[in-house]
Image: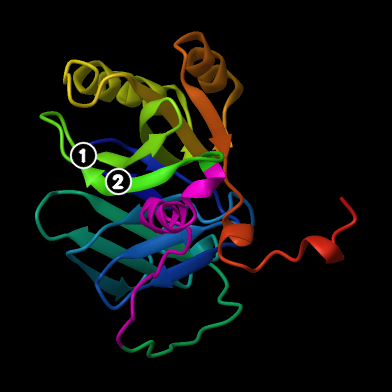
Amino acid sequence: MTYTGRLTAHLAQATRLLMVKADGSVLVHSDGGSYKPLNWMSPPATMRVGEPEPDEASAGVTEVWTVQATKSDDTLRIAIFTLHHDSAHELGTDPGLVKDGVESDLQRLLAEQIERLGDGHALIRREHPTPIGPVDILARGPAGHVAVELKRRGDIDGVEQLTRYLDLLNRDPLLAPVEGVFAAQQIKPQARTLAEDRGIRCVVLDYDEMRGLDDADSRLF
């Protein structure tokens, strides 16, 4: 297999999975590498199946797939030696991926279960507006207002984002003092260290428990 265009790439002869999709894309997969193809041609593209050159035929090539990109000179040329299996399937209209456990789900659940931040907390609003974007949750705690930034996986960028919100909110005399809470399903050690150094409290959320799917009595730990 040879790919020519913005770069040139070559794959030596081997047993591989070739996928030709209805949108015109062609993907070359090996048995490893998870979901990522070794090479591919993105749509729009056209594919032509032709006869091999004489020297290719003498080497055992039975047919050649030539995939040409519509909007560029990129070409994918695949030499077929042995066809182990050939099948076609009509997949129909895809309903699309519905993600569960995204940040909006966490925000809704935490707003409904604001006591997870500690005793004496009450929800003020979700998506509290600021000049640089909305704070996920604004609540009232025992010592004043609380700004909550929610992430599925908490990293340093999330801490920096919350820091900017806190800087703005604490300039408002009607809100100050505002405490920061960084809440996530997982918080990276570097993010936790940075948050605690800035006086931001970290809260780890168990999504399954929050939506009532985790039975604590049936767990060993």
Q: Above or below — where is 47 with respect to 59?
A: below
10 Å crowding of disc 1: few (<14), some (14-19), many (20+): some
Question: 70 left or right of 134?
Answer: left
The residue positioned 23% from the left and 26% from the top of the image is 175
Mark identifier at residue 124: 2
Name the spot of residue 173 as percent of width and height, x first. 17, 19
Amino acid on which disc 2 is placed: Ile
Residue 2 in the magenta stretch? The answer is no
The Cα–Cα distance between marks 2 and 1, rounded to whole angstroms, is 14 Å
SS at circle 2: strand
Q: How is the image coloured?
A: rainbow
Q: Which mark is residue 52?
A: none
Q: Residue at x 48, y 18 (%)?
A: 195
Residue at figure coordinates x 57%, y 45% from the top left:
205
Residue 23 position within the rendered picture, expressed as x and y whole percent measured from the top left = 24, 73
Asked if one can make out residue 92 in the rendered structure from this viewpoint, the answer is yes
Give the magenta-colored segment's residue range: 93-116
Instruction: Report x, y in % for residue 140.
Output: 37, 37
- Eye-nearest disc, 2 or 1: 2
Seen from the viewer's position, the closer of residues 62 and 173 is 173
Above or below, 40 relative to 217? above
**106 inside magenta stretch:** yes
Please state the horizontal and vertical placement of residue 20, each as a whole percent of the image: 37, 73
**Secondary element type, mark 1:** loop
Would residue 53 be seen by someone viewing this image from the given angle? no
Looking at marks 2 and 1 on the same chain, the residue that comes earlier in the sequence is marked by 2
Residue type indicated by callout 1: Pro
- Image-quadrant location for residue 193: top right
Residue wearing tag 1: 134
Q: Residue at x 51, y 58 (%)?
A: 29
